[in-house]
Each structure stands twice: as C-alpha cells, then as structure tokens.
Amino acid sequence: MDYATLMMAVMALPVAAAVIMAILPAKATPRPIYETLHVVSLAGVLALAVVLVVGVVGSGQPQDAVGHWFHLDALGCVFLALIGAVGFLTGLFAVPYVRHDVEIGHMGPGQVKQFYVFFDLFVFTMLLVTMSNNIIMMWVGIEATTLSTVFLVGSYNTKLSLEAAWKYVIVCTAGVAFGLYSTVLVYANAADIMADPHQAVFWTELLPYAPQFDAMIVQIAFVFAAVGFGTKAGLFPMHTWLPDAHSEAPSPVSGLLSGVLLKCAMLVIIRFYILAVQCVGPEFPQAVMLVLGLLSVAVAAFAVFSQDDLKRKLAYSSCENVGVIALCLGFGGPLGVAAALLHCVMHGLTKSFVFCLSGNVLMKYGTRDLNKISGMIKVAPATAVLLAIGMFGLSAFPPFAMFVSEVSMFVAGVLSDKLWAVIIAAIALTVVIAAFARVVTGSVMGTPPEGMEKRDVKPFAFVPEIVLAVVIVWFGVAMPQPLLSGIEEATSVVLQQDSDALQQAPLFKDLFAATDGASDVASE
Amino acid sequence: MTGYTLVNILGGALILTSMLVVLSKAPRKAAFLYAVQSLVLISLFVVLGMTTGSTELYTWAGTGFVTKVLFVPLAILFVCKKMGDAGAGLEPKLTPVKSIVLIAIEVFVCFVVVQGIDLPTAADVKPALAISLAHFFIGLTCIVTQRNIVKQIFGYCLMENGSHVTLALLAPQAPELVEVGIATDAIFAVVIMAVVAMRIYRTAGTLDADDLMELKG
C-alpha cells in the first residue's frame, strides 16, 4: 500500500468506527461492542501512524495525498505520532473509566455511545488538522475539533459540565473565527500573486511565494492566527475556557485535550509562523510569540499554585506549558524551534499520563478537591507512586522527559540574548514546582480519610499509565534516535533550512549529537 | 454608479443590519434581522460577481441563501419555539447607546488599519474591506455584550459573515469548495451551539450567561 492510501486510511478508520457505533442502537448493544470497536480503531490509528511516521521521517520525503489536499511532512509527523500514541493510550484508559462511570450511575447507555462516537471523531479531526495542506481545511479541522469535543466535555449532562461545554464552544468558535479571518487573508494574498488561484489554497504551494506577500496583510494575518488558534491552544489571555472544559470533561478526554489537541492548535500557529518568517523576517512573529508565551507562563504558574481542584490545577499547567512552547518559538533559532517541538511531545505524553491518573484519583476518592484527597500512598499505593512520578515529571525534574525540553528552552533563551525573559520564565516555573510539590506532600502523603479501605483502582486502568510512565522516564534518560532525527527534520521544515545548515547553529549540534555521530560512524 | 460603488454601499448596509441584530433584544426578532442581513450579503456577492465577472460568486450567493438566509434563522426560530421564547427579556450588558458608540469606534479603527493594505484587488473596495473587518468585530461585540446565550450564537454568525465578505472582496475567484467548506462548518457550529443551549435550558432552566458563572478561579 502506498503512503497516500495509508494517509487516507488512518483518517478513515476512526470515522468508520464512529459511524458504525452511531448506527448501533444504544440500549440494545452490549457495552463491550462499543469498547472493542473503539480500542481496535485507535490501535489501527496508532499502527498506521507508526508506519507513516517511520516512512516519511526515514526517507526524508514528504508525502501528498488526493492531489495537494493532504500533505505529511516531518513537522506533521511529530504531531501524527503524538495523536497515534496518546490517542490509543487515553482511549484504552477510557474503557475502565467509562465502566466505572456506568457503575456509579454517572453515565447511561446513550451517554456511553455518545462518548465513544465523539472520542473517535475527535481523533479523526486532529488527524485532519495534522495532514491538511489546504489552509481552509486546516481551519475547518480545528473548528471540527471543537465541535466534536463539545459533547465530550458535556458528557455528564450536569449544569456545571454544560456550563463548561457552552463556554468552550462559544469562546473557541469565536476565537477560531479569528483563525478563519487570518486564513482568508493569507489565501486572498496568495491568490492575488499566484497565476492559478486554485493552487493558492495549498500551504506547500503558496509558501514559496511568501516573500512576495503584502507585509501588512501577513502581519495582521499572523496576529489573528496567534489570537485565533492561540485561543484553541490555551494561550493567555484567550485561555478562559480551558480550565473549565479540561476539568469538567471525563479524565481520558482531558488527557487527550491537554496532551494533544492544544499541540495541534500550536501546529497551525507554527504553519503561520513559517509563512510570516518567510515574508517579514523572524523578528515580528517571534515578538508576538514571546509576549503571548511569557504572559501565559507567568499568569498560569500562579493559577496552578492557587488551585485546590486537582484537574483545574492540571488544566492551568497546560496553559503554562503551551506558554513554554510559544516562548520557545519566541526565542527562535534552530534550538528554540527544536525545543518547542520537543516540548509538544514531552508535555503531551506527561500531561496525558497525569490526567489519566486524575481519573484514578476520581475513581478512588470521588472528588477533585485536593483538601479532601490525602494519604493516597496508604489506600491506593500504585496510583500514589505514579502520581508522584507525574507531579515530578510535570515539574520538569530530571530524569523525566520534560526536563530535556525545558532545559533546551532555557538554553535557546540565553542564546537569543533574552535573559530577562529566561529569568521571568524560571521564576514562574519555580512556582509550578512548589505547586506540584504540595500535591505530593499533601495528597500522596498524609493521612487517608477515615474509613477508606486500602484498594487501588482496577488493574486494567494501570496498563496505559505504566506505559506512559516508562516512556517519560525513557525519553528523559535516553532520547531515542528516531525521535531526535524526527525533531531535527521537523525543525528544518519550520526554518526552511536543510539539516546541514541547522548543525552550524550554536549548541544545536550538541543536542542532536547522536544524529551527527551516527552519520560519522556510518561514513567511516 | 459603478459596481464597486454599489458594493461599498451594500457594505454600509451590512453594518446597519448587523447593528440591528446586536441591538434587538428578543432572539426571534434577531433571527429575522439576521435573515435580512444575510440577504444584503447575498446581494453583495451578486453585485461583486457581476462587477468582477467571477462566476464562483454566484454559487456562493446560492449556498449563502440556503445556509444564511434560510437555515440559520429557521434553526434559531425552531430553538426559540422549543424553549417557549425563554430569555427574550434578558437585557444586554451594554445600553444601546454604548453599543452604537463601541461599534462606531470599531468601524473607525478598521478603516485606519485597512489603509495600510497595499493589494491591487483591494484598491477599489477598501471601504467595503474595512467594513467587513469591522463586521467581524461587531460579531465579537455581540458575543461579549449579550447575556442571552442564544443571542451569542448570532455573534458567531456575524463574525463568520465578516470573514466571508473579506474572502469575496479579496479573492472573488476562490474555488467554490473553499466557500462550501466554511459554510458547512458554520452550519455545524450553529446546530451544535443550539443543541448545547437547549440542553442548558433543560438542565439549568436558564439562558442567562451570568447564571453560567459557577466555574471560576
């Protein structure tokens, strides 16, 4: 099978599963049928994603499908891999989580069906964003991610979850309308310059013409894109929907929203960033990202600290980490861009891991209030140990994965001569460490609530969590070579430079030394 | 009168009608006004099509008529009927005078910004272009200032209309598929927002955005 067919297959699979599940009658269909369709489709997405990523990154050749409509380059591969892996693992965690919700009467058959149908549609919409080459469809994809997740956020049909769903849909559709405006501006400008206006809608076709674009239009378009898609990514001050939606959604959905969806929105911003850099040079787009990133990190860090609700704390931490990604893009240069992409992966894995654990905590304690959650090590030891790992991982302590990307960010900041921004970020991240240390001392340790028996959640729930825990330690201790070369190739897509030019940049070679060393050994 | 002059005049009519949508209190009335506003939009597409010779714009006018003049207002009227016109008495957060002043400021700022654009296709339609950008912000104003969540849906529709006019002005030759993609997505957005609004009304018995402020911090 060729890559174009595989690209279509990876998108068709979750849609097909969603359609079949939607047709099945909710009450008459046993729950295991939904669970099997859901898990098998997501496993298929993961398998196809791996084949595509290995093929595209390995060959260094981007692939197109349906003419120019779909395009998979190394940059898209970073996000495709994340969707495949985190989509499957959070999808797997959803099975015991939904079973528990059914047992305690939070979900009926109709809601279970709705959950699985929209989960698969959600995965499809993210794949659409990642592989769209048509800029209008890229926007449609982002908008569709909102529409497919509204009912996931409002799964429980309670006043609070519906309030969160409303804020989510109204803020994100309004925000993403800014994204539409910027897309329209870019398209219109491209159509004016290019001989065939039908080609002006394709990102790969319009990019070579970027230097001829009207500078004013591109600047307006970039600001609109940063605001519009930044709303979806959860950048301050457009983040208001995020803590509500991510905390009210069922935990596996929160994991996928925080771990992957926010990064997909960042991918679209990165596509506009590339365009803006090619047209008006790096200063303007970097300044915009630096301001948004630094504000997000600084404001969200204190919100992380002040929250008593575990999932809201994690949601604000997502704002903070999306801020870190924006900040890396603001620092710019090969190291800054590589750090941004690396942080997308590392935070995606770590945050989905911790959100799944918040699901364990909810199943055990029945509350998200950290004042009521204590002594976990005594009543749910496995969850407690994993949660401690997660909290240290989110604090970016070594040997966990986020340590690598955050250190890269600091180095990129120093190299770009923006020491003041590095210092502000460092102070904010210290506040985050304090916030998560408090969770470990207060909730993992301490005395358990009176009368609570010692019994952890069902073993099945631990399978995806242990896999994620192993991965974040593995990536923190010894980053695998294919990941490094993938990030390097993706960086060269963002900067529109080849790998040799990137290696000339200060310190970049040190981070990617393994690549260089490997080729040296091969040449000897 | 040249075609472009007519386009610019219709642009002015767009601002007037969108202002009426923002100012009308009851969602039912807003639905009718939105249908009128969409008719102005469709006329703008037709006039622009005749002026530029772009046949694509006629297709846009056709799909726009079905989606914007008929579907969206009917969907909202259906929702209002289902909920027995609930929330019709909810006052917006800004008085009409303040809303008008705010919209006037938005239009002025957009005119200033558009002067900086130096694109051959934009030369004849700069006033309309400024208006389309302002239209987008009027939609945003509608979302921010309305307490009735059904009225907030119109805010999104106005923003989307603003983007649509910009696309028509700057890229009249855009393939129909581009326009169809945007229109379809907007329909889904309106339907989903309407469903969520109805669920909120069923569960919480309110359509007041101020009552939906329990999640904080």
Image (cartoon, rainbow, N blue to C red):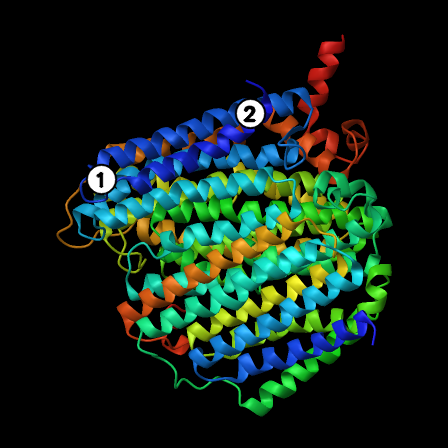
| Alpha carbons under labels 1 and 2: distance apart | 44 Å
Question: The residue marked by circle 2 belongs to what chain?
Answer: A
* Mark closer to the observer (1, 2): 2
Quadrant in the rendering for residue A465: top left
**Label 1 amino acid?**
Asp
Residue at image coords 62%, 48%? B177
Q: Is residue A462 above or below residue A388?
A: above
**Label 2 amino acid?**
Thr
Residue at image coords 52%, 58%? B186
Instruction: Locate residue A374 relative to residue A413 in the image: left or right.
Output: left
Q: Is residue A305 visible?
A: no
Q: Is residue A387 visible?
A: yes
Farthest-out residue, left: A451
Instruction: Locate residue A100 relative to residue B141 in the image: left or right.
Output: left
Q: Residues within 10 Å of mark 1 (few under 14, many from 20)?
A: some
Q: Residues within 10 Å of mark 2 (few under 14, many from 20)?
A: few
Residue A380: x %, y % from top left: 24, 42
Q: Is residue A423 above or below residue A35?
A: below
Quadrant in the rendering for residue B121: bottom right
Question: The residue marked by circle 1 belongs to what chain?
Answer: A
Secondary element at image label 1: loop
Q: Are marks 1 and 2 in contact (CB under 8 Å)?
A: no
Quadrant in the rendering for residue B100: bottom right
Residue A65: x %, y % from top left: 62, 30
On residue B29, which mark appears? none
Secondary element at image label 2: helix
Q: Which residue is mark 2?
A: A5
Q: Which residue is mark 1?
A: A456
